[in-house]
Image (cartoon, coloured by chain):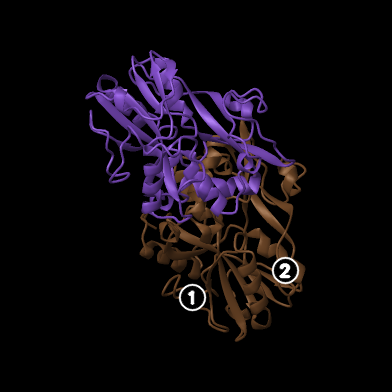
Chain colours: A brown, B purple
Amino acid sequence: MPAQTSPAHAAAVRRAVRDGRHDAHTSGLAPGHVQGNLVILPRELAGDFLLFCQRNPKPCPVLAVGDAGDPRLPTLGADLDVRTDVPRYRVWRHGELVEEPTDIRALWRDDLVSFVLGCSFSFEEALLAAGLGVRHIEMQRNVPMYRTNMATVPSGPFRGPMVVSMRPYTAADAIRAVQVTARFPAVHGAPVHLGDPAQIGIADLSRPDYGDAVELHAGEMPVFWACGVTPQAAIEQARPALCITHAPGAMLVTDLLNPQLAAF
Amino acid sequence: MPAQTSPAHAAAVRRAVRDGRHDAHTSGLAPGHVQGNLVILPRELAGDFLLFCQRNPKPCPVLAVGDAGDPRLPTLGADLDVRTDVPRYRVWRHGELVEEPTDIRALWRDDLVSFVLGCSFSFEEALLAAGLGVRHIEMQRNVPMYRTNMATVPSGPFRGPMVVSMRPYTAADAIRAVQVTARFPAVHGAPVHLGDPAQIGIADLSRPDYGDAVELHAGEMPVFWACGVTPQAAIEQARPALCITHAPGAMLVTDLLNPQLAAF
């Protein structure tokens, strides 16, 4: 695939995924394009989940919602099909992970509703473009994520703690990082906390609940953003009869460009 | 004076000052209007001082510069006269404060250049409007200000440390405060530091170099903004033969509305 930034390139990634030529993570693919978290739920839970997202917009920024039974999301890509265009899925039944297929056409039903939520890849691109390093990328690790003592606002069966991702910065860079990421409310927006981790219930930064720990250098403080693992944790809590998500890091590549999400 | 927010009201404040009916601080007058720091220097230093402001825009945001010998600043008010419209002036000779008159017509010269710099009153109004308390206002004190170990970029004889003002916030409110004040680069903009005061050379928050100390509540961090005392300190360092400024808190009230300064 050519190293160009264009909708055609995003569509080319989706075609490669659809044709079985790519089944791994999507980090670094179609640079400049928005990648999204996928959540598919039965219609009977879709209203509660949409309201959960509305009530918790920082961890659950909704980019698109499909019609029940319709696997297309034309606002994210004319050809996009949520049944085939994610490299690897996770299928959950009653809160248990049961399989990780590369295609869910056989599981599709007339009552399934697709949600695509913004992902931190977009704001990390903005941080890098602003000259702000991203430690876990420098260390070639997954971002460290932590369960906090900040509760989400429940909706129906969806509830649980806010999960946050962490990136270390000096104070001056943390201030810049607030300004850079505040422009992107559709992909988690400004941080939710910075400084003392204990204030949000994190006992030990070196032991993240998800992902990998990263180093803090002298003079740096941890900066915490709301994380897309929050809705996943809420769904685990809700234990729906069926839920299908993307596998971690294997995101839905869309035609949207990251700068299109800038609120100002 | 009526409690309305309009250019007429700002002009009414200036008229009261000009006519000798008001010679004290201007805090709370003409709400909604930009108030400015005034610096008047001989033309031979004006170029260096303008360059000092250009090189240090966070502490020295320039709102207007007059022509040499011209006491008017029509972009800030059609009737504005810098010789009469500030409630109380300070006259400095060779770096020493020599008098505090309420009118400088007798001192005016053909070679004097007026600078008006943005002031934190504007961003404090934005913080309050955003529901963020401002501790020194709550405590009815002057804002605490500190000399830091951050050097300004010199220009000619103007040099010295950056002076910062401090307002305490919880982490979540500090993040909001960055977003709110970043919109106003013309009045100091986003903070320059938050968290550990020692990192910027402040040994003891309870002993500010200017203004009054304020309380930090449990769970709060100090948030530091570049301060308009920075150019005053640089001028003291430069020891010009003549310099005229406003007296602390007795600002120049302009027709500009604070929201007009929002960069986005």
Which numbered dot is residue A73?
1
**Residue at coordinates 40% horizontally, 51% vertically from top-left?**
B9
Query: How many marks overall?
Result: 2
Which-is-in-front pick, marks 2 and 1?
2
Which residue is identified by label 2?
A: A154
> Where is the N terminus of chain A found, in terms of image quarters?
bottom left
Counting residues from the start of the chain, the first of labels 2 and 1 encountered is: 1
Chain letter of disc 1 in the image? A
Secondary structure category for the residue under label 1: loop
At label 1, counting other C-alpha atoms closer than 10 Å, the crowd grade (few under 14, some 14-19, many 20 or more) is: many
x, y (%) of residue B36? Answer: 41, 38
Identified by mark 2, the residue type is Pro
Can residue A142 be seen here? The reply is: no
Q: Residues within 10 Å of mark 2 (few under 14, many from 20)?
A: some
In the displayed structure, B209 sits above or below A78; it is above
Q: How many angstroms separate mark 2 from mark 1 (CA)?
A: 27 Å
Toward the viewer: B200 or B105? B105
